[in-house]
Amino acid sequence: MHSAVVSHTLDTRLVGIAIFVYLLATVLYFVYLPFRKQSVGIGASLVALIGWGLVTASMVARVVISYRMGWGHAPFTNLYESMVFFAWAIVLIYLIIEWRYKNKTMGAFVMPFAFVALAYTTIGPGIRTQIEPLIPALQSNWLIAHVITCFLGYAAFAVSCGVSIMYLIKARSRDRGKDVAFLPDLGALDEINYKSVVVGFPLLTLGIITGAAWANYAWGSYWSWDPKETWSLITWLIYAAFLHARFARGWRGKKTAVLSIIGFAAVLFTYLGVNLLISGLHSYA
């Protein structure tokens, strides 16, 4: 048990180090934004990748520790673990999109989400870093499928929100006759926003479906209008409206950027607001 305690200290220390690494990556992306120095951009991406590796190592260590303790479960069964996984997923999705579109300016608007999510694990209310045995409702393989799909979807929406903020800043400056030259073209930002939602929406859909299957396993009902279930549906409807408006009504630009930001606000309330403000079947999370 002593070795497990030592390992547990190591796993939280890795997260502590990763917080500062994510902060450094955020600063480097902001420095890169106006100056566009290639060395700074490469450094920012490398530091973000190192931070992601540290978070990965912390989650692997946590799984190993849980098995040593005889409980053996995935590293996202409470608020602390899920927040760490959220920060991990944001950086993963962001780095893939950065590589795909060869544009590092987005990092200044996306990495802060990952940094804040990870920093929240040290200051947020209701955070418990202890590794504990799973309650009966969580003892299901549906847990892994549900959490992974939901949080990868949330991460894609975080990217779309960051890009949408960039879009609105660029559009507002153009309207005032002062173009922000260091931000990408509006068309490119709109396309990345759309593609991020296209990635996130089916993942969220799968998350809701697997969550319903998990609910049936744990509570004997696929849907009970629990506050988190209700807000998950509201979030899904917002992004469904985003895609419908784009396909059916040809919405582009400011309208979809605003809708994307509203959608991510709903994501945050679904994830944190419901847990902290409203009691329900998901309160243990």
Image (cartoon, rainbow, N blue to C red):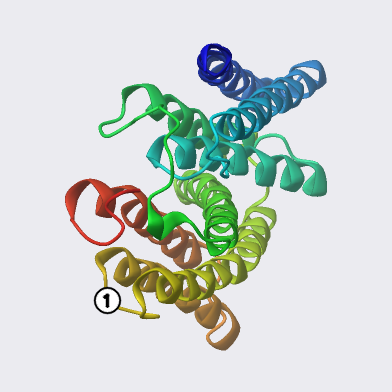
Instruction: Identify the residue shown where x is 51% and y is 35%.
Output: 84
Q: In the rendered image, is residue 140 in sight?
A: yes
| Residue 52 x, y percent position in the rendering | 67, 29
Task: Give the residue type that dot 1 points to.
Answer: Trp
| Residue 122 x, y percent position in the rendering | 38, 22
Residue at the disc numbered 1: 225
Instruction: Identify the residue shown where x is 59% and y is 60%.
Output: 149
Instruction: Identify the residue shown where x is 48% and y is 47%.
Output: 165
Horizontally, residue 7 falls left or right of residue 50, namely left
197 and 80: which is toward the camera: 80
141 and 197: which is toward the camera: 141
71 and 59: which is toward the camera: 71
Residue 68 position (above or below residue 8): below
115 and 39: which is toward the camera: 115
Horizontally, residue 276 falls left or right of residue 234, namely left
Label 1 element class: loop
Q: In the displayed orientation, state which residue is furthest to the bottom.
A: 248
| Residue 155 x, y percent position in the rendering | 56, 49
